[in-house]
Image: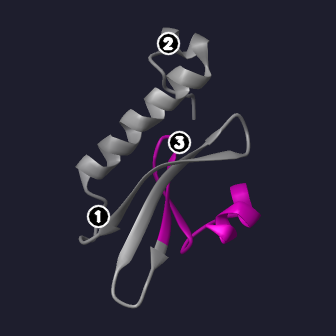
Amino acid sequence: MEQLRERNLRAHEPLVRHLEGDLWELREESQTNIYRVVYFFFTGRRIVLLHGFQKKTRRTPRNEFNTARTRQREFIDRNEPDSRRTGGVMDG
């Protein structure tokens, strides 16, 4: 997390990986587990963490991605009143 905060927009693999649209995945490994945190940038360089999970498969499971996307829309709806006109999705 600290490396992401320091590198911000300049972070790249293996620390982070682009998922889809404006969603990114922070990658962290411990000795026995792999963890992911899905995030996006809000109004420039503000990092919003949406969903964390333990990764057990090679690909990011679609349900984990969908949870993050739902939380992103809810966050945007709460923080940008005008976003309701566009369905709460930020342009990439």
The image quarter in which residue 74 lies: top left
Task: Report if residue 12 lies within the magenta region.
Answer: yes
Eye-nearest disc, 1 or 2: 2
Residue 71 left/right relative to 22: left
Residue 88 appears at what percent x and percent y? Answer: 48, 21
Q: Residues within 10 Å of mark 3 (few under 14, many from 20)?
A: some
The type of residue carrying mark 1 is Arg
The residue drawn where x is 70% and y is 55% is 9
The residue drawn where x is 32% and y is 43% is 67
The type of residue carrying mark 2 is Arg
Label count reads: 3
Assign a secondary structure to mark 2: helix
Separation of residues labelled 1 and 3 (CA atoms): 18 Å
Eye-nearest disc, 3 or 2: 2
Depth check: give the residue in front, 22 or 67: 67
Q: Which residues are magenta?
A: 1-27
Q: Which mark is residue 59?
A: 1
Task: Report if residue 64 lies within the magenta region.
Answer: no
Residue labelled with disc 2 = 84
Residue 68 appears at what percent x and percent y? Answer: 39, 44
Separation of residues labelled 1 and 2 (CA atoms): 31 Å
The image quarter in which residue 48 lies: top right
Of the numbered discs 3 and 2, the one sitting upstream in the chain is 3
Q: Quadrant of the C terminus?
A: top right
Q: Which mark is residue 22?
A: 3
Residue 84 appears at what percent x and percent y? Answer: 49, 12
